[in-house]
Amino acid sequence: MRKSCLLLFVLVSLSGQVLLAQTYDIVIKGGHIIDPKNDIDAIMDIAISGGKIVSVSKNIDTKQAIQVVDAKGLYVTPGLIDIHTHNFVGTQPDHQYEDGNLAIAPDGFTFRNGVTTVVDAGSSGWRTFPTFKAQTIDISQTRVLAFLNIVGEGMRGTYEQNPNDMDARMTAIVAKKYKDIIVGIKLAHYTGHDWTPTDRAVEAGTLAGGIPAMIDFGGSTPPLSIEELFMKHLRPGDIFTHCFGQLGSREYIVDLQTNKVKPFVYEARKRGIMFDVGYGGISFAYSQAIPAAKEGFFPNSISTDIHVGSMNDAMKDMLTCMSKFLAIGMSLHDVIQASTSNPAKEIKHEELGNLSVGAVADVAVLNLREGKFGLFDYTGYKVEASKKLECELTIRAGKIVYDLNGIVTPIYPPKVVVVNKQSALNGDTH
């Protein structure tokens, strides 16, 4: 019995030494890497260890890895960043996106789309952010950042029309307190013909240390001028979301008479205004996006505005949004850039959205499927596409969190068995 236990100890010790001898936790082998920030667009390997990227090069030895991802024929990109989501899910009646039932928990939809970072777009305000942090941000595997709503309560339905709860000073105080999480200020859904809400959102961003404001015009009669918005109210670096929306209560960027992007839109881009998709339920129309694409005017960032309604309608998810821009002429490289390094830059977190050595290992492995796909908008207009992006595998902070078809060997990493040496010698293996 004593000899058997000693033999078991030796075998376990040897097994442990084999695991300890591995240089890498994961090697992603043979994939086509697209990493716009580092100007990589080539077939290369990636090695991951301790939650970080430790090597990006050709012919990394897979024998040095505990797990190997077979990425041959697939695209390997930084983990995708969706900077317009709604995640403050809760149970409060009639609260909509703020602690209500129209928001959705992030982990259920992010990883299956290659998304590793989301930015909640103003669901919470300065008064409700601590609740959002406790019940969503702190418990999610997905990295959850936030734009803080200029309305103190957040996106609580008709309450958003209350200018008296738009306090730039209190908003800035909370944004500075949680500066590692709160990346900007959001204005959404206000319907009055009034610049006060915009100006207070921008003021809060300035008071908070120069973080960007994301502006969603709710609509007004007559519509507020977006030329005035871009040139007189916003700062360079501020974000105009729903940029391809076409609603009667909002001015839009493409002139329907000429079918051309309005000249001042180009001037706004030169001035440093960022154009974000923020697809949503009714905030993206091909009648805006296709004419803009024909001129080469593409968004700085692709985002979903995902919530219970939009995810089950024309929008679907991040990869569907990205596929729509591929279908209307945006290059794959630029689509990836608009979903990784560009949004990271917009929210001033440029440590994200890239595959640099030393960066947190957030990685997406994507398949560009060929076939016949119908990509429609909320008006019913459909684009027939021959290619569509699909997520094969997602790595978040060095851990495989989604694997569609079992392309990892072994699928699950071996468990390390720890045996107390003296206990083994005494015949106790428990």
Image: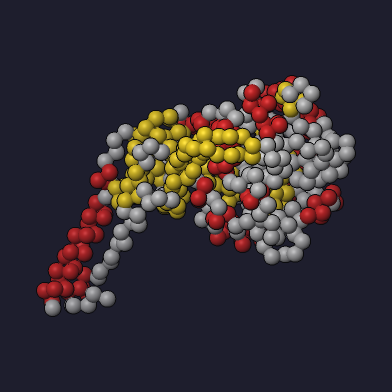
Residue 309 vertical position relative to residue 326 in the rendered view, above or below:
below
Q: Position of residue 88 (x, y in %)?
A: 66, 57
Q: Position of residue 54 (x, y in %)?
A: 36, 41
Taking depth in this image into account, of 324 and 171 the one nearest to the observer is: 324
Taking depth in this image into account, of 216 and 124 the one nearest to the observer is: 216
At a point 45% along the width and 53% down the height, the residue shown is 401
Taking depth in this image into account, of 323 and 231 the one nearest to the observer is: 323
In this picture, residue 341 sits left or right of residue 20: right
Q: Position of residue 87 (x, y in %)?
A: 63, 54
Which residue is the extreme one toward the front? 372
At a point 47% along the width and 36% down the height, the residue shown is 370
At a point 61% along the width and 34% down the height, the residue shown is 383
The reply to whether residue 149 is in sight is yes
For the C terminus, the quadrant is bottom left
Residue 80 vertical position relative to residue 236 in the rendered view, above or below:
below
At a point 69% along the width and 65% down the height, the residue shown is 91
For the N terminus, the quadrant is bottom left
Q: How is the image coloured?
A: secondary structure
Image quarter of residue 308: bottom right
Image quarter of residue 92: bottom right
